[in-house]
Amino acid sequence: MIDLVDVHKTFGANRVLQGVTLAVPRGQSMVVIGGSGTGKSVLLKCILGLVHPDAGQILIEGQDVTRADREAFLSRFGMLFQGGALFDSLHVWENVAFRLLRGPHRRPKDQARAIALEKLRRVGLNPRVADLYPAELSGGMQKRVGLARAIAADPAIIFFDEPTTGLDPIMSGVINDLIREIVTEMGATAMTITHDMSSVRAIADRVAMLHAGRIQWTGPVHEMDATDDPYVQQFINGRANGPIESLR
Amino acid sequence: MILTAPVARLGQSVLALLAAVGRVALFALQVVSHLFRPPLYPREFLSALVQIGWLSLPVVGLTAIFTGGALALQIYSGGARFNAEAVVPSIVAIGMVRELGPVLGGLMVAARVASSIAAEIGTMKVTEQIDALVTLSTNPVKYLVVPRVLAATLTVPVLVGVGDAIGIAGGWIVGITRLGFNSATYLKNTVDFLEPWDVGSGLVKGAVFGFLVALMGCYHGMTSDRGAQGVGRATKSAVVAASVLILAANYMLTELFFTS
């Protein structure tokens, strides 16, 4: 469903993506792992059109995203941002229903609010939080609201950018379980970037490791532990020694 | 090498300045083009009207009343050197509506509004809220910039008009309480000497200054660097750029309006 073919992206002298080729099949949950600064977020932003690749092709169902109708293209996406990226000036329910109150998905306010409350319930939040502002919520609750917003318009493709960063292990587990349930329930194609191995094991059908601007290894999650790729082994076992250089 | 280095640095600075001017001009064109295309966001526009117009009224009013009072004292003391104390009401009125009302009002709005817009949009940028808008099929320029620019362009002339009236009132209070003017005579002289274009030119200046203030706030917010330092720099740059542009635009508009 999502095909990246030899994607390159450079910022100044920093060659972030140096020929990424990756296929994400429809209905699968792909998790991209890799160290900090390896270009995982840039990869997602390239697919979303927030960053324009210097070379290569990004195809969604065979259609080049750079030539697609941007609004129609984005209307099929949902995204959970690392920090939630909730709009401070809007109530929680307005954040969740943002897409339902504007643009092609627009519907009456009462209906949009009802859907927002339902999505908040789906991510385990009490409807009482609907009329609060994001700043009044804890980090974990903000992540859940972000998740509710990502699924509000029932997207076909959902991206998760570091979904558990900054959360305690229990809340991380809750968010991981929610993501897995929602992706399975909606039949959506999901792409997650993370370096949290508990997330990888909870969310992934397939895993791809990004290193030095290329996909170092990709395969089903159940093959990850058994692979003899030294980069993957060093990363998933958190070893300081190995082919991946670490600063000490 | 030693001799050419300063020239190279100067060249780099000039190129950087021209590039910045080009980027701002393109941004302004983008904003203007969106002003006339749907969708419009009425809720964001109304919120910007309140934030920029209504909430700036106290600071503009206070600036105007003290400026009007001080102007009356200065003109009286200067005019006394050639027995022209009687011109205080007319000069205060003309000075306020043509120059001081729009310029000081614009500068106060720049300090208050450009900084707050740049800080708000800059924070939205560094917390990925702008990216989130894009992924939610919403054009950030249309949603964040156009309502603010439109609101500032429409409300700053109103603020200038109110500021003019308050400034003239400040001069009148000082005139009758400290300088011995008769109240009715002061007001008559004020009204008799003012022409509609004196007021109109100030309001047009206000609209231009409002546009520049919001444009600079939005531009620097949208191009803010990461982190608290980046947002701080964007805020400072927005206020400096808006203030300098107001003063430059004021000179150009004065040339345009009042020289033959």
Image: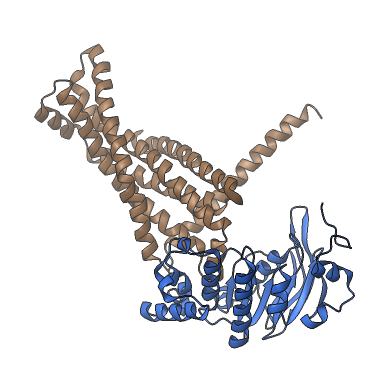
Q: Is residue A57 in view?
A: no
Q: Is residue A203 above or below residue A236?
A: below
**Res. A206 image quadrant:** bottom right
Q: Position of residue B257 (x, y in %)?
A: 35, 38
Image position of B44 (left or right of B231): left
Taking the image as shown, residue A218 lies to the left or right of residue B232, namely: right
Q: How is the image coloured?
A: by chain
Residue B177 at x, y percent in the picture = 15, 24
Query: Would you identify the image quadrant in which residue A28 lies?
Result: bottom right
Q: Quadrant of the N terminus of chain A?
A: bottom right
Is A110 situated above or below B79? Answer: below
Q: Is residue B10 left or right of residue A234?
A: left
**Chain B: drawing colour:** brown
**Where does the image place residue A143, in percent across and percent down from the top left?**
56, 69
The front one of B161 and A33 is A33
The residue positioned 54% from the left and 70% from the top of the image is A146
Q: Identify by letter the chain in blue.
A: A
Asked whether B239 or A125 is in front, the reply is A125
Q: Nearer the viewer, residue A1 or A126?
A: A126
Question: What residue is rendered at 54% in x and 61% in y?
Answer: B130
Q: Residue at x 53, y 49 (%)?
A: B220
